[in-house]
Amino acid sequence: MRAVLVVNPKATATTAAGRDVLAHALASQVKLEVVETDYRGHAMAAAAKAAVDGVDLVVAHGGDGTVNEVVNGLLAEGASGAVPKLGIVPGGSANVFARALGLPRHPIEAAHQLLLAIAEGRGRTVGLGKVTTNCTPGRWFTFSAGVGWDADVVADVHRKRGKRASPALYARVAVAEYLRPSQGKQRLTVQLPGQEPVSDLRLVFVSNTDPWTYLGGRAIHLNRGCSFEGGLGVFALTSLHLPTVLRHLTQAISRKGETRGRNLLRLDDVDEIRVTSEEPVRVQCDGDLIGEPTVVTFQSVPRALTVVI
């Protein structure tokens, strides 16, 4: 088996010693090439080259951003045909995709599980989401995307690059964004297949799995019926008034995790979601800001990729 290990040395939980141990362990089972990323898009380019070269496995060692780049590189030519399998050894602060797959949070434990999966030929084929806008090409996402408030939070966190991207930082930025006078002024319209458009929405979350994300050790649920084997989940609010936000936040972080009530549009297992806005609005996928379009389309792509797990 030929494999490429893509390492983001700047990720929160990656170390030179850990990378060397992982590379040595993988090299005992596969013919290995190691790529350390040193610029934005490097992981994507390395994974795309691996796909063209016919490599069997690409292992991403980093955070959600590194995993997202690797996935987009692997699927640069689409999900049809022979695509290398994906391996993940978490190295970031959140590691949402890896955790949603049930992988251990500790890199050493995750590496051990990966080696066992390689030896036993185990894999899980998962569906992914794809987002296309009127100003950017298609972008794959593994666990979530969003239009509005959450994308504004991502943009602010990206501007604070000197600080560690921790759950606490995201929480502080989310509160600050909420309190801004301009927050919630965008008017979004959602079009779902076979249904009348729903207008005057303030934010739209799109999930490819559940939990949608984590607040430290606590899972946050927006679409309980969403999974890697089904379609996308949509969670949208018609109001960002404090009682509405607090009610749905409380539901989302509860153990039951069932969101319901007024001012809410929520559906699971959706094939396509189209969001439009009269003014440019920020869009994020897997925690990465991808632009400020006026038209966004989210598509569910079943059985897009196999993860060695």
Image: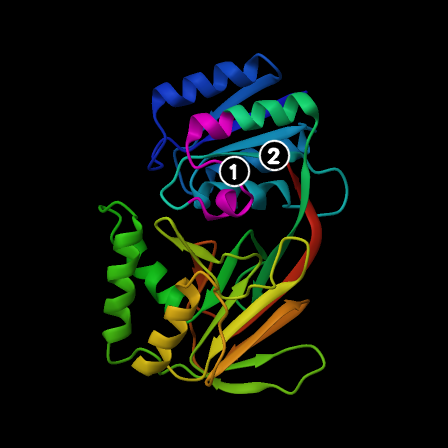
**Colour style of the rendered protein structure:** rainbow
Magenta highlight on residue 13: no
- Label 1 vs 2, first from the N-terminus: 1
First to last magenta residue range? 95-111
Residue 78 seen in render: no
- 83 relative to 258, above or below: above
Q: Do residues under tags 1 and 2 come within 8 Å of each other at their CB atoms? A: yes
Res. 208 image quadrant? bottom right
Question: How many C-alpha atoms fall within 10 Å of the one at disc 2: few (<14), some, or many (≥20)?
Answer: many
Which residue corresponds to the image point at 60% horizontal and 86% vertical from the top-left? 197
Q: Residue furthest right?
A: 81
Q: Secondary structure at mark 2?
A: loop
In the image, taking residue 241 as reference, residue 304 lies left or right, namely right
Res. 18 image quadrant? top left
Q: Circle 1 sits on which residue? A: 103
Which residue type carries mark 2? Ile
- 84 relative to 78, above or below: above
Q: Where is residue 270? Give x, y as percent.
A: 66, 69
Q: Could you say which is closer to the camera, residue 235 or residue 139?
A: 235
Which quadrant holds the N terminus? top right
In the image, taking residue 238 as reference, residue 133 lies left or right, namely right
Q: Where is residue 101? Give x, y as percent.
A: 56, 44
Which quadrant holds the C terminus? top right
Which residue corresponds to the image point at 44% horizontal and 44% vertical from the top-left? 95
Kindly identify which numbered label has been placed on residue 309. Answer: 2
